[in-house]
Image: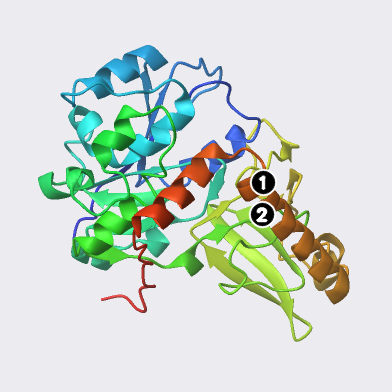
Amino acid sequence: MKNQHKIILIIPYYGTFPEYLHAWLLSVSYNPDVDFLLVTDIQYKNKYPENVKVLNWSFEKLIKEIQTNFDFPINITRPYKLCDYKLAYGLIFQKHITQYDFWGYCDIDQVFGSIRNFIQNDILDNYDFIELLGHFSLHKNNGRVNNFFKMDGSLYGYKKAFSTSRNCNFSETTGKIQIILKNNFKYYHKPDSFADLSRWHKKIMLVDNSVCSHKHQIFFWENGKAYMAYVADEKVCVKEFMYIHFQKKNPKIEFKDVSDVKSFYCFADKFVIKNEGPPTKEFIYKHSNYRGALREKIERTIAKFKLFFKRYVLLDRTRKRILLDVKMSGYKILKPKVTESRL
């Protein structure tokens, strides 16, 4: 049997760990064939899973380490700015990833299912990048890919992105994705493999409703796998995901001792222990928060208005500046294609 490619995910984190960290670590522990490198100065009282490696670096030390890779002054005044540097992790942490075939990054506002179920050797054999978004991505660990962020194609370019304290969206739409597409890298992109939840709805809904969305649906984690259970034609159906990303939500967690936890529900406001067996149709109806087509349409309209108001009316200077720069420069934004099937 062919050996698996070795994978490591890199997560710098500063400030205070959220309460749902316990759920994240539990899901990480069920992926023993993927390593995680946590870079932080937070003192965690409990024991990390064996596949979590920790670099106890202060924020100042991390900035110094990053600076050693560039011959111009970088500008990092707050941890959130590290988002722009995700593409350079292959250089910044190169001493810590030499034994790995792929490195990548993820967030901790996630619950992982089985990563290897969705990213198997045939995919890793044939692509330079697996998934392209900021909350999860893998990069082939070689010189060309580790330096790809220096190539042309992005809206600003890495020197400008790294020289300003403002966020430049360099790790996503106008940065990473454009460089990959405009320099003909091989990428694998399957947005229906992960559940990216909308932060603008009280109900648990996917950001892209065209991917896989139903009137009555709930999400849960069980024995190392992440699922959506939904009702279709009066029957309970289940879809597996690589991970559930509950972005910008701050769910309470009703368990902190995860030693005996085998399954839990991921509701919009809390994580609760799940009983054995599949959820019933009645349970899904009760907890899906579906209140009719009209209410759903009203909520979606309000959510879109809130998003529009925050992005274009409030002083979101970063987004306004990016949109203005795109318009003034005539910059063309390319969209990635969905990978239809495995090689």
Q: Secondary structure at mark 1?
A: helix
- Nearer to the camera, 199 or 304: 304
Crowding at mark 1 (Cα within 10 Å: few <14, some 14-19, many 20+): few
Q: Is residue 48 left or right of residue 337?
A: right
Quarter-of-image position of residue 46: top right
Residue drawn at x 67%, y 52% is 307
Say if 292 sits above or below 107 in the image: below
Q: Is residue 133 left or right of residue 62?
A: right
Q: Which mark is residue 308?
A: 2
- Nearer to the camera, 152 or 285: 152
- Image coordinates for residue 160, horizontal then vertical, percent: 29, 35
Mark 1 lies on residue: 313
Say if 90 sits above or below 73 in the image: below
- Image coordinates for residue 96, horizontal then vertical, percent: 23, 29
Q: Amino acid at mark 1?
A: Val
Quarter-of-image position of residue 225: bottom right
Q: Secondary structure at mark 2?
A: helix
* Residue that extends furthest to the front in the rendered view of this protein: 328
